[in-house]
Amino acid sequence: MNAEAALEHLRAYCRGMPPVAAMQVEVEGYADGVLRLAAPLAANVNDKGTAFGGSLTSLMTVAGWGRVTLALDMAGEAAEVYVADSSIRYLAPLRSDLHAEARLAAGESFEDFLSTLRQRGRARIQVEAVVRLPDGGAAATLSGRFVAIAKR
C-alpha cells in the first residue's frame, strides 16, 4: 500500500475507535519517518485549563501504535499491533492544542522488525513519541515497546 493510502486507512481506523474519536484525534501526516497527530485542547482539557495527562499519554500511545501500523500497511503486512509497555514523562503544562510526533527509537530498524515478523509471526520495536509545546519544547514524552502479531 502506498503512503497516502496507508494514511487514509489509519485515519479511518482512528475515527472508528470511540476513545480516539472522543479526543478528536486527527492524523496530520507522515514524512521522514515521523507520524504526526493532533487533537484540540478543548476536547482534552483538565480542571486547570491545561492538557489532561491521560490525553497526552493516549495521543502519544496512538501515535506510536499508528507509526508501527502505518509502516506495516506500507509494507503490505497484515498484523495486529499492541503496546507492550511504555514510560511516560510529563515535562511541562500544555495550554494549547496537542501535537504529537512518533518515530522509531534510535538504533531500531524497521527492516529487522519486519524480518522477525515474517520469520516468527511476531516482532517488537521501540518507538519514541513527544507532544510539543508551542515553542517546540516537550510537554510530555513516551518511550514505548510495540508488538506486532501477524494475522494468519
Image (cartoon, grey):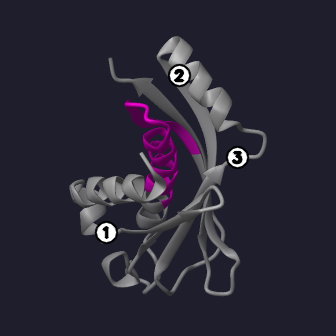
Q: Position of residue 61 (x, y in %)?
A: 48, 52
Q: Earlier in the sequence, mark 1 or mark 3?
A: 1
* Residue at left offset 42%, top offset 60%: 4
Tell which residue pokes out farthest to the top in this image.
120
Residue holding disc 2:
117
Residue 150's place in the image compared with 55, above or below, is above
Mark 2 vs mark 3: give the one in front: 2
Where, quadrant-wise, is the N terminus in this rendering?
Answer: top left
Kindly tell me whether residue 89 is visible in this rendering.
Answer: no
Q: What amino acid type should be assigned to the residue bearing mark 2?
A: Leu
Q: Which mark is residue 87?
A: none
Q: Label 1 crowding class (10 Å Cα cut-off): few <14, some 14-19, many 20+? A: some
* Region of the chain picked out in magenta, as a range: 60-86
Mark 1 → mark 3, Cα distance in angstroms: 26 Å
Residue holding disc 3:
105
Q: Is residue 80 magenta?
A: yes
Residue 22 as seen in the image, left or right of residue 138: left
Q: What amino acid type should be assigned to the residue bearing mark 1?
A: Met
Q: Earlier in the sequence, mark 1 or mark 2?
A: 1
Q: Label 2 crowding class (10 Å Cα cut-off): few <14, some 14-19, many 20+? A: some
Find residue 41 and report its image quarter. Answer: bottom left
Kindly tell me whether residue 2 is visible in this rendering.
Answer: yes
